[in-house]
Image: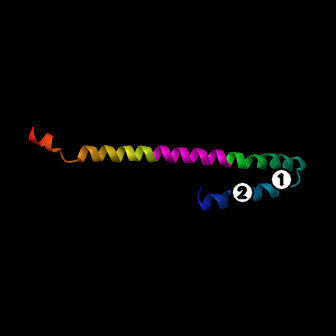
Amino acid sequence: MSMLRIVSAAGRLRAVEELTADDPGWAERQGERRAELPRVRNAMARIHGELANQNGEQVLSLELDAVVKNRPAARSDRAR
């Protein structure tokens, strides 16, 4: 997540907190949600890592395909 998105999200959260300060149940509900944040962040990081790994494997596979297709013919292939 880029710094701009983080700053933007933090600003929105502050604005919501100011708007809902008069609702006594709101803070309690937010506390419950905030308690879940580490678990959610860990899950997001794991998913991001898995996606990055899959993308890396796909890129590596494509690069290997390109290398194999563009490689010079082996000596036994040249003789034919």
The x and y percentages for residue 2 are 58, 59
User: Residue at the location (49% across, 46% down)?
Assistant: 53
Which colour assignment does the render follow? Answer: rainbow
User: Residue at the location (89% across, 53% down)?
Assistant: 22
Q: How many marks?
A: 2
Describe the element under mark 2 as helix, strand or loop: helix
Relative to 58, 48 lies left or right: right
Residue under pointer 1: 20
Instruction: Find out whether the residues at labels 1 and 2 contact each other: C-beta distance under 8 Å.
Output: no
User: Residue at the location (86% across, 55% down)?
Assistant: 21
The amino acid type found where label 1 is placed reads Thr
The x and y percentages for residue 80 are 9, 37
Q: Which mark is residue 12?
A: 2
Depth order, front residue of 63/80: 80
The amino acid type found where label 2 is placed reads Arg
Q: Which residues are magenta?
A: 41-55
Q: Is residue 49 magenta-colored?
A: yes
Mark 2: few/some/many CA within 10 Å (<14, 14-19, 20+): few
Q: In which quadrant of the rendered image does the N terminus lie?
A: bottom right
The x and y percentages for residue 29 are 83, 46
Q: Is residue 1 magenta-colored?
A: no
Q: Is residue 11 above or below residue 65?
A: below
Magenta highlight: main SS: helix
Mark 1: few/some/many CA within 10 Å (<14, 14-19, 20+): few
Relative to 50, 43 lies left or right: right
Q: Earlier in the sequence, mark 1 or mark 2?
A: 2
Depth order, front residue of 30/39: 39
User: Residue at the location (72% across, 49% down)?
Assistant: 38
Depth order, front residue of 9/51: 51
